[in-house]
Amino acid sequence: MLKPEPMQRILVVGPRQLLEGCIEVLHDLKLVHLRDYTGEDPELKLGKPLPRASEMSEVLVKLRSISKVLGLGQVEGMEEVEVPPDAAQRIRSLETNIAEEDASRKKVEGLLADLGQGMAALEPFAALGIPLDLYRGYTSLEVFVGRAVLELEGLETVAPHMEIFRADDVVALFVEKSKGAEIREFLGQRGFSPLAVPQGEGDPKARLEELRRERAKWEEKLEEINRRLQTLRERYAAFILRAEDKFAEEIEKAEAPLRFATTTHSFVVEGWIPARASEAAQSKLEALGPIFVSFGEPDEHEDPPVLLANPKPIKPFETLLNVYSTPSYREIDPTPLLALFLPFFFGFMIGDAGFGVVLVLFGLWGLRNLKPGAFRDIMYVAFVGGIVATIFGLVVFGEAFGIAFHPGGVPGEARHVTWEDFGIFVPLRPIIEKTATQSVTTMLLLTIVFAWVHLSIGYVAGIVNEAHHNKRHAVAKVGWFMVLLGLFMTVLARVSGNPIARFVWTYILPIPRSGPYAVGFLSTLLGFEFPLVALVLLVAGTGLALLESYIAPVEVGGLLANLMSYARLAGFAIGEGIIDATVTTLIFDNFVLHHDILTAVAGFALLFGAFLIIFPLGALGAGIQALRLNYVEQFLKFFRGNGIPFRPFGVKKTTEA
Amino acid sequence: MADAGLIAMAAGICMAGTGIAAAWAEKVVGGAAVGAMAEKPELFGRGLVLMVIPETIVIFGLLIAILLLGHIA
């Protein structure tokens, strides 16, 4: 915890004939992060892939084309299948078979598309019912066929001698050739869209019927092909997917020498290994024969890959940390801090026992049903956040599903529905009534206390990080820590009458701050007793911070902005609380309490719908805000990131979320 | 108090102004972040961080509005 797994440099040198065995061992170990050799030494050449690599790549390409044709990849619940030694041969013949089926499927699909087009062109003519050969071949007549959306009023005046056929909106018009141009213009103005007369002769209905029969025949054929492919899919899906994995793995092994340095008779492998595993690796490699294995500690300028080592309950938070950045090898791993503060802030903002329980159940569902991965990790975070929200809802804010346990004790506040209205008496009194106007100051002050704790921890982590790195910067961080304390005291002095401020002054910062310990002129200027300690901290802290940068005095304003940024916690908690209270009160007063049963059912449906909108949006918002306070406000105080994630040889690359 | 209406309006303008400002800033940052993510999906985390930075503007507005409203009572 707090530090990544210690790494050691591993160097393996051996004769060429042991290369394959060595690759096998390294691959099975799944603990060595290879350092790619880039050919920097003229004596050592890049290795060549094992001879079987090209054949395997060819088979893998065939496999991927098969699984594309069969639409594999989303197949769930596959049973484990052994890949037989003659797999390559079987895959080749399977591929020929499937490629053939695929080609005929494509051909039939093309034919069907053509048929469909031909039928679409024939349909309007079938409706008119005139034999196709009668549309052409006239010397004195011009024929217009098309769709007329508007009425063709006044057509007779343009062409007194004409014959017109209609079926729905399809119109066939036979007119004298001399009137052709006029008619064309007339039709053009009325949105007439001409249709091309299909080739062929005879009754269009009969032809359409013929095409229909043909289409049915081909459709049957297509179905047959699809059935055959489906059979192949059912029979081979497991084998193909398993073989894909297997061949990808074999290719990784066969191409590994490309990452090694070689001479004519020997090879050199360099990489990183967790220190705890080096002994096991050494004995396994040396068992192969005359192989030289050596280990070394990373030196100052090296950046070993980072394998975070957190206990299981906080491991899922690593996913959220990696979204931001992987810590570098030599700095504090902030996962435990994230695991502590993220659910705390989230729970504070939700602060409702009912929604908390819903989140817990939702998280549990995800943990049971999702495969390990980023989504499952996020479900776990929701689960922990839900527990904290439930505790806040029960103990601090006293509400469940947006309904307070008891009526508010403050006169003049708007009335809300409470659990007591339903005859449920919860034996817990809220510590803070978050929807009451007078609680706003308390809530804001509480967030300032959270901010101070959160940011102070950030600075302490910064001091530890910089202590190994740059002493001057470490001292500057101490300065910032002091400035933060000074700012915190200033805010507290401003509202010293508030119970939370009193609590902090009494139990956390019991220092004299009034009378001779206050700064006279500042107290007069600001209108409250300004503690001398705060002034000293601010001035001395800023002085130390100057060691880091010359603009430190300006950045004090930035730190104040950071402190105020935590007000979002209160803003969100109060906002959510008031929306929930309003919605529940409106619905219960107007639909449920003292109403008949049908109205009450409608009311509950409405309430459910309202919660369905409010709650997920609230949870998403609270999650992002809580994450932001960690990412932006705290991490920027100490976290550099940009570490190289530990990706051992032999472990499949997982795609990032 | 005669000024109560003015104070309330000032608080309202505070919220509206900072809200619009935050939205504007997020629009710019969000568009650029999505553009960057299209090229490098692993920038999601950085994008999210940059995206939520301007939200602080509206928090300042909220604080000032609360302070203003405190003068009515």
Image: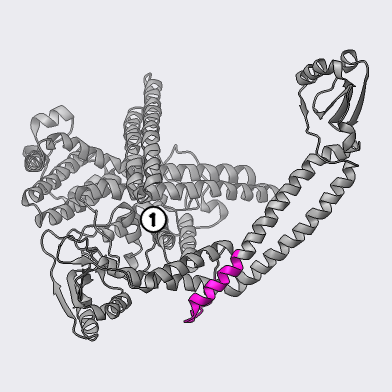
- The image shows a total of numbered marks equal to 1
Residue beneath the point at 54% across and 46% down: A613
Q: Which residue position holds label 1?
A: A392
Q: Give the range drawn in magenta.
A: A77-99
Three-letter code, disc 1: Phe
Q: Quadrant of residue A393?
A: bottom left
Between residue A177 and residue A493, name the one nearer to us. Answer: A177
Residue beneath the point at 32% across and 65% down: A314
Q: Is residue A428 above or below residue A500?
A: below
Q: Is residue A78 visible?
A: no
Q: How crowded is mark 1: few (under 14 residues within 10 Å), some or many (20 or more)?
A: many
- Does the magenta-highlighted stretch encompass residue A83? yes
Residue A104 x/y as whole percent: 66, 60
Between residue A499 and residue A309, name the one nearer to us. Answer: A309
Residue A552 x/y as whole percent: 13, 37
Q: In this view, does A295 lie above or below A176?
A: below
Between residue A549 and residue A206, name the one nearer to us. Answer: A206
Name the chain letter of the residue that bears numbered label 1: A
